[in-house]
Image (cartoon, rainbow, N blue to C red):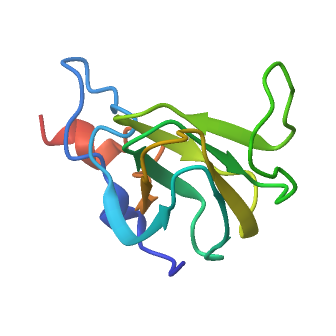
Amino acid sequence: MATTAASDQLYPLSTDNGVAIPLDIVRPLGSIKWTVASGDGLAITIPDTFALVSVFSNVNCLLDFSNAVSYPAADATEYDSSFIIPADTILTLAIPSQGAAKLVNLSATDPCLVVMNCLQKWAGIGLRRQLERR
């Protein structure tokens, strides 16, 4: 990911007392989508530049960063380095690793569409320049 100047990472908005609002607005850097057939798993590659992402899936699915889970995912089993993405929910995640991963469709009847957007977070603190503009 390209390095940007701190002035490009200012929060566009802040609270009444000038405290920055984390992730109020983020800058999109890229996106990728995958389609997983019903009752199946799909080996994927997460680009090296993807660290902070928003993820959406139209059905329940499992995003496995260890690339070890196979379909079907068993009930009452803990899957290390994985995350269940609930259907029709947008999540913001700091993903633990890039590269090889796996998507497992948890629906036996519907195909799964997963969309992942790479985001750039804004600066973590309210900078003096923000506070003086009020």
Picture residue at 67% right of the left edge, 38% below the top: 83
From where the camera sits, is residue 125 visible?
no
Observer-nearest residue: 98 or 3? 98
Picture residue at 75% right of the left edge, 60% below the top: 97
Residue positioned most to the bottom: 2
Picture residue at 75% right of the left edge, 49% below the top: 71
Residue 24: name its quadrant: top left
Where is residue 38 drawn, in percent x and y? 52, 52
Q: Is residue 38 above or below residue 108?
A: below
Residue 134 falls left or right of residue 37? left
Observer-nearest residue: 80 or 128? 80
Which quadrant would the N terminus be assigned to in this image?
bottom right
Where is residue 88 drawn, in percent x and y? 34, 35
Residue 27 falls left or right of residue 42? left
From where the camera sits, is residue 92 visible?
yes
Picture residue at 42% right of the left edge, 34% below the top: 87
Residue 9: name its quadrant: bottom left
Observer-nearest residue: 110 or 102? 110
Where is residue 115 drawn, in percent x and y? 40, 59
Residue 78: name its quadrant: top right
